[in-house]
């Protein structure tokens, strides 16, 4: 009988979350459309969810020391993803902030582009590897630990210094997102929401959807990452005080690195350790599947992503002899899209300026309001360019573009 009362819910959700992330990664690779923060988060969450689901099945009713090499790897991956998650959400929020400020790579110099990449790679890879490698070794009290019901995991001491170093990695990045980037993003969208909706009167729901999705991406830290980080610190401190009476600041090297054999803990030991320990274990285990599902909901359900899934289904069906109709939208040209965090092409970065304050869409002198060989560009063409630039932020506004094309054709016919 499984030790975890909720079994098999956790392994099922973890494996499903891993499959969804794999689908998101594959479709994004096919479209060659990616963001470094999303890439880091998807990759490590995929590995963590799959290994966590496997652990919950292998050690469902036992705490046997086995598969030691596998546990060595998984215990380090667990700590690495613990650090990657807040770092990656900080990268994503920062990229959304740069989009609202229109600081694309194309508009910055080579030095600033290298600096931006260095910041993202440092946050998403170098710092997590540093924490999960040499820093973890300093506070590691055994080779790994096996918890009945959940499998192998890392083993750190309960010192004050260790608790601060590991858990502040889960608090400082979301605090930076919330205090530095999030207010600016919300302020820009608040100032421009009325004007953009007025411009898109024929497609108001799409504009609101664009904004809500971007705000949701930027809100991951304030709604999920920061509360989990604070709760983890509180539960760690409660457990340390209960276990030691007073938490030591830093146990000496000999204490930490003596008797390094793997530890084995039964589910009864977990229950006997107190409510705070049980809450900490379940909180740390369920954070990754929930974050993976949120990530898929934000990036894996766009119109372009759904079209990619359908094309994949059609391809597989044709291989096995099934005829599945292709996805069409009638006679209207489909302009599927998603939120993109990369560079914005210059010829599609026309925008609406709202008063003296910052603007969401960058204004280019070569797009609207200039004269060409045949005269001034028409308002219809200018509006079409506006809509196309907005589709760089989220999926294309198909109906509005179609209507503008019809209006453009009618205008040209009347001129003839």
Image (cartoon, rainbow, N blue to C red):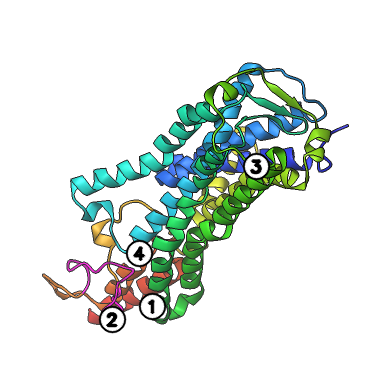
Choose the circle earlier in sequence order: 4 or 2.
Answer: 4
Residue on which the image places disc 1 = 191
Q: Are marks 2 and 3 in contact (CB under 8 Å)?
A: no
Q: CA distance from mark 2 to mark 3?
A: 58 Å
Across and down, in percent, residue 295 comes to 55, 51
- Tell me if 207 is positioned left or right of 160 in this view: left
Q: Image point 49% across, 72% down: which residue?
A: 208
Residue on which the image places disc 4 = 100
Across and down, in percent, residue 71 comes to 63, 23
Choose the circle earlier in sequence order: 2 or 3.
Answer: 3
Residue on which the image places disc 3 = 246
Across and down, in percent, residue 21 comes to 57, 42
Q: Is residue 361 magenta?
A: yes
Q: Residues within 10 Å of mark 3 (few under 14, many from 20)?
A: few
Q: Are marks 1 and 2 in contact (CB under 8 Å)?
A: yes
Q: Is residue 361 visible from the viewing direction of this image? A: yes
Q: CA distance from mark 1 to mark 3?
A: 51 Å
- The answer to whether residue 166 is above or below residue 194 is above
Residue 355: which disc? 2
Q: CA distance from mark 4 to mark 2?
A: 15 Å
Q: CA distance from mark 4 to mark 3?
A: 48 Å
Choose the circle earlier in sequence order: 4 or 1.
Answer: 4
Check the image and name the residue furthest to the right: 1
Q: CA distance from mark 1 to mark 2?
A: 9 Å
């Amino acid at each position: 009988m499984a030790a975890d009362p909720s079994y098999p819910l956790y392994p099922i959700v973890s494996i499903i979350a891993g499959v969804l992330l794999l689908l998101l990664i594959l479709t994004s690779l096919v479209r060659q459309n990616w963001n470094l923060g999303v890439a880091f988060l998807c990759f490590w969450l995929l590995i963590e969810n799959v290994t966590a689901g496997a652990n919950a099945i292998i050690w469902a009713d036992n705490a046997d020391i086995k598969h030691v090499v596998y546990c060595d790897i998984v215990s380090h991956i667990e700590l690495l993803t613990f650090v990657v998650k807040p770092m990656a959400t900080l990268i994503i929020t920062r990229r959304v902030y740069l989009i609202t400020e229109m600081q694309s790579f194309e508009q910055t110099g080579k030095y600033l582009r290298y600096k931006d990449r260095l910041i993202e790679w440092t946050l998403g890879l170098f710092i997590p590897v540093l924490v999960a490698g040499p820093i973890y070794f300093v506070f590691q009290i055994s080779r790994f630990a096996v918890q009945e019901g959940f499998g192998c995991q890392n083993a750190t001491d309960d010192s004050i210094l260790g608790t601060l170093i590991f858990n502040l990695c889960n608090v400082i990045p979301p605090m930076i997102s919330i205090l530095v980037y999030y207010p600016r993003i919300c302020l820009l969208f608040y100032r421009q929401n009325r004007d953009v909706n007025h411009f898109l009167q024929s497609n108001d729901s799409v504009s609101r959807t664009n904004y809500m999705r971007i705000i949701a991406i930027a809100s991951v830290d304030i709604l999920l990452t920061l509360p989990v980080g604070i709760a983890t610190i509180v539960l760690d401190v409660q457990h340390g005080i209960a276990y030691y009476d007073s938490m030591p600041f830093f146990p000496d090297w000999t204490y930490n690195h003596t008797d390094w054999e793997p530890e084995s803990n039964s589910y009864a030991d977990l229950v006997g350790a107190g409510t705070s320990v049980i809450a900490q274990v379940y909180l740390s285990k369920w954070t990754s599947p929930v974050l993976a599902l949120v990530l898929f909901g934000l990036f894996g359900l766009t119109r372009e992503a759904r079209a990619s899934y359908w094309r994949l289904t059609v391809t597989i069906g044709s291989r096995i002899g099934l005829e599945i109709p292709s996805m069409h939208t009638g006679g209207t040209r489909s302009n599927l899209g998603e939120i993109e965090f990369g560079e914005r092409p210059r010829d599609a970065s026309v925008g609406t300026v709202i008063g003296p304050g910052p603007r969401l869409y960058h204004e280019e002198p070569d797009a609207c309001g200039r004269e060409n060989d045949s005269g001034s560009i028409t308002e219809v063409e200018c509006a079409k360019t506006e809509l196309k630039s907005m589709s760089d932020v989220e999926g294309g506004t198909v109906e509005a573009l179609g209507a503008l094309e019809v209006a453009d054709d009618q205008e040209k016919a009347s001129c003839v």
